[in-house]
Structures are given as structure tokens and as C-alpha cells.
Image: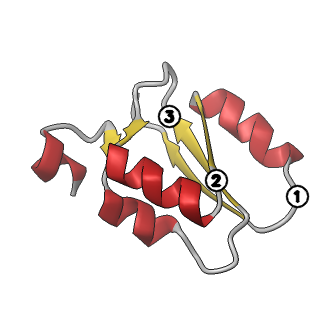
Amino acid sequence: MSKELYGTSHKISLEEAKHIYEEGTEKILIGTGQTGFVKLSEEAENFTEKKCGVELFPTPWAIERWNELEGRITAMFHITC
């Protein structure tokens, strides 16, 4: 979806943010790739902040953070770069 909208898979669209969000989620954690290329689109950022908050980290750090967090956390990890 992102590639069609933005010409890259490194920007998360509103539709993708809605897809990974589940009712009751307390936080969304996003691994942004080894070097942190992945970003939220403005619309996706607004959506996630209103719903539950979001944390973005380079994927290795996001994995560590995932292991620290408790509660209802939804995560997405970009692993191709």
C-alpha cells in the first residue's frame, strides 16, 4: 500500500496504521529498519497518537523495547533494510 501511495515502502500509510491497530491496544511499537528509514505518514501519526500512542525505534532497539514493555502492545518490525 505505501509503495503505491508514496513510491516507497518506508512510509506507513493511514490504512496500514489502521490495520495494525486493535481495539484496546495501549501502544504501537514500530521497528523502523536497521538504520531507521521507516516513518509514519502525517495521517498515520495523527491516528496512532489519538488512539494509543506510538514508539518508533530502529528495529534492533525496537526488539529490545518490545521485551521490556508490558500491557497490550501491538508491534510492527521492518526487517528488509
Residue labelled with disc 3: 32
Using the numbered discs, state the Cα–Cα distance from disc 3 to disc 2 in whole angstroms: 16 Å
The mark lying in front, picked from 3 and 2, is: 2
The residue sitting at 34% across, 52% down in the picture is: 43
Q: Quadrant of residue 73?
A: bottom right
> On the image, numbered disc 1 is attached to which residue?
70
Q: Is there a contact, CB below 8 Å, between mark 1 and mark 3?
A: no
Front residue (pair 42, 6): 42
| Mark 2–mark 1 distance (CA, rounded to whole Å) | 14 Å
How dense is the environment of label 2, judged by Cα within 10 Å: few (below 14), some, or many (20 and up)?
A: some
Question: Type of residue at label 2?
Answer: Gly
Q: Nearer the viewer, residue 22 or 68?
A: 22
Mark 1 crowdedness (10 Å alpha carbons): few <14, some 14-19, many ≥20:
few
| Amino acid under disc 3 | Thr
Q: Residues within 10 Å of mark 3 (few under 14, many from 20)?
A: many
In the figure, is residue 28 to the left or right of 12?
A: right
Q: Earlier in the sequence, mark 3 or mark 2?
A: 3
Please give the label number shown on residue 41: none
On screen, residue 31 above or below 19: above
- In the picture of the structure, the residue carrying the numbered disc 2 is 53
Q: Position of residue 2 (x, y in %)?
A: 23, 50
Q: Report helix, strand or loop for mark 2.
A: loop
Badge 1 marks a residue whose secondary structure is loop
- Relative to 1, residue 25 above or below: below
Q: Quadrant of residue 24?
A: bottom right
- Residue at 49%, 19% in the rendered image: 35
The picture places residue 4, in percent across and down from the top left corner, at 11, 51
Give the mark nearest the N terminus, 1 or 3: 3
Q: What's under tag 1, amino acid-wise?
A: Glu
Q: Residue, x 46% and y 60% (percent of image)?
A: 47
Query: Who's the residue at 56% across and 39% down the image?
Result: 31
